[in-house]
Structure formats: C-alpha cells, structure tokens
C-alpha cells in the first residue's frame, strides 16, 4: 500500500475529490496518509482533519527562499515516507531537489489541455480567462508528472470539457473541476499506486 501525500495551499476541492474517491474504493494500492499545506488556516487542512488524515503546516513565508523551503519540504516528505506526491491546488514553487528525489512520483492537475494555457503565471482563473479570450471551443484538465519545467512534465491523463456560449471564467472553472479535474486526478493517482504508468522517451505510457 503506497503512502499518498497531498500538497495544498487553499480550499482543497481536489483533495476532497481524492478523499471521496478513496472512500469509494477507487484509489487502489494507495492511501492518503498526510496533507501538507504551504499556508496556515487553509481549509484543505480542515478537510483532512474531518477525515482523520494527518495535517502538517509548512508555511512558505517562514523560509528565506525557494531553495530553503524546498529543502524543508523534502525533509518532511521523507519523514512521512511519501511514495506518491500529489499537488492539489499547491501554489508554491519547489525547486529541482524535490522532483529529483521523487522522479515520476509527483503529479499535478492543471485546468487546461496542456500545452495550451500552461506554464508560469497560468493558474486559477487566469487559465480560464485566457481560454475564453482565445475563443477555444474545448478546454479541459491535464494530470502530468511534476518536473523541473513548470507544467512541462509527461502527460498522464487528459479530459476535454466543452466551452459554452456565455461562459464566464468562474462558470468554466467550475465545469472543468466537476467534469475533468475531480475525475482524472483520482484515476491518475490510482494508476500510479498500481505502477500502471511508465515514461518512455519522455512520454508517459498508461497501461490500463
């Protein structure tokens, strides 16, 4: 049984999707054992507590720079015996020492179909604002491995979502979460826990 550690910064809706999926038996071979927040008072920690999951606060503001924070995070992940690490609305950049310590063991969910609307600065409503400004007819979500390149790791799963006339960024954000993010993130984590994803020549190959 693999230990899943979830990294959060805010409300924790993706964390809730993972918790709910685990309760339904949809995450095979793994268990959420710890939630680490980069901010004090994040509601995601309350979600963890309500479900009997250990919560740790590792405030970004307590560290001088990204390197120092990343070192503290790496030490914490090792102390928690993390096998799979999931970014679930985690808004803090970790440097290469963390992803190098956990190659192809760290995943993130991004609210667009990478390589569209991704990279530095593309997070939250900004992604959906840009999608609407470009007039795309289909958007969606992507689960990818975390590497040293922001949103640049091998793609594990993607799911498309229709863009509708009259959508606002907020409405589109909600649809992408409900129809894509909350479905493919637990699925991808389950695949990883069962060793069903391998990377060949920089491309993630899923063995269902």
Image (spheres, rainbow, N blue to C red):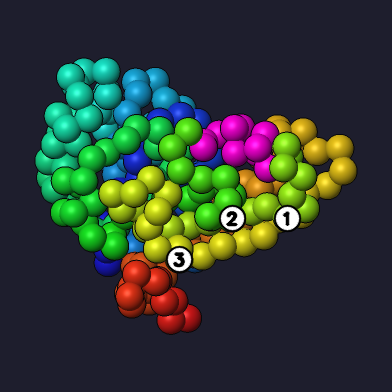
Give the CA distance from mark 3 to mark 1.
Answer: 19 Å
- Out of 59 and 47, give the one closest to the viewer: 59
Residue plotted at (32% across, 29% down): 38
Residue plotted at (38% across, 76% down): 196
The disc label shown at residue 83, or none: none
Give the CA distance from mark 1 to mark 2.
Answer: 9 Å
Q: Neighbour class for label 1 at 10 Å: few (<14), some, many (≥20)?
A: some
Residues at marks 1 and 2 touching, judged by CB atoms closer than 8 Å: yes
Quarter residue 71 falls in:
top left
Residues at marks 3 and 2 touching, judged by CB atoms closer than 8 Å: no
- Out of 25 and 151, give the one closest to the viewer: 151
Of callouts 3 and 1, which one flags the residue occurring earlier in the amino acid sequence? 1
Residue 163, percent from left and from top: 77, 49
Residue plotted at (53% across, 55% down): 114
The question of residue 126 being in magenta is answered with: yes
Determine which residue is flagged by label 2.
113
Tell me which secondary structure the magenta stretch mostly adopts: helix
Determine which residue is flagged by label 1.
138
Mark 2: secondary structure:
loop
The question of residue 123 being in magenta is answered with: yes
Residue 141, percent from left and from top: 58, 53
- Out of 147 and 141, give the one closest to the viewer: 147
Residues shaded magenta: 122-131
The disc label shown at residue 156, or none: 3
Of callouts 1 and 2, which one flags the residue occurring earlier in the amino acid sequence? 2
């Amino acid at each position: 049984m693999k230990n899943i550690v979830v990294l959060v910064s805010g409300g924790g809706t993706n964390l809730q999707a993972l918790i709910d999926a685990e309760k339904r038996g949809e995450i095979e071979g793994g268990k959420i054992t710890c939630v680490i927040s980069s901010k004090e008072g994040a509601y995601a920690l309350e979600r963890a507590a309500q479900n009997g999951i250990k919560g740790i606060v590792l405030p970004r503001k307590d560290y001088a720079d990204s390197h120092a924070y990343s070192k503290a995070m790496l030490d914490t992940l090792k102390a928690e015996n993390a096998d799979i690490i999931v970014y679930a609305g985690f808004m803090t950049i970790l440097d290469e020492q963390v992803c190098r310590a956990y190659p192809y063991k760290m995943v993130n969910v991004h609210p667009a179909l990478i390589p569209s609307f991704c990279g530095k600065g593309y997070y939250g409503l900004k992604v959906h604002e840009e999608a609407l400004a470009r007039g795309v007819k289909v958007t969606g979500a992507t689960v990818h491995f975390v590497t040293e390149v922001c949103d640049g790791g091998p793609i594990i799963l993607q799911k498309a979502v229709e863009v509708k006339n009259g959508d606002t960024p907020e409405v589109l954000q909600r649809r992408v979460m409900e129809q894509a993010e909350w479905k493919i993130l637990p699925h991808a984590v389950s695949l990883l826990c069962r060793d069903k994803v391998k990377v060949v020549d920089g491309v993630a190959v899923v063995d269902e």
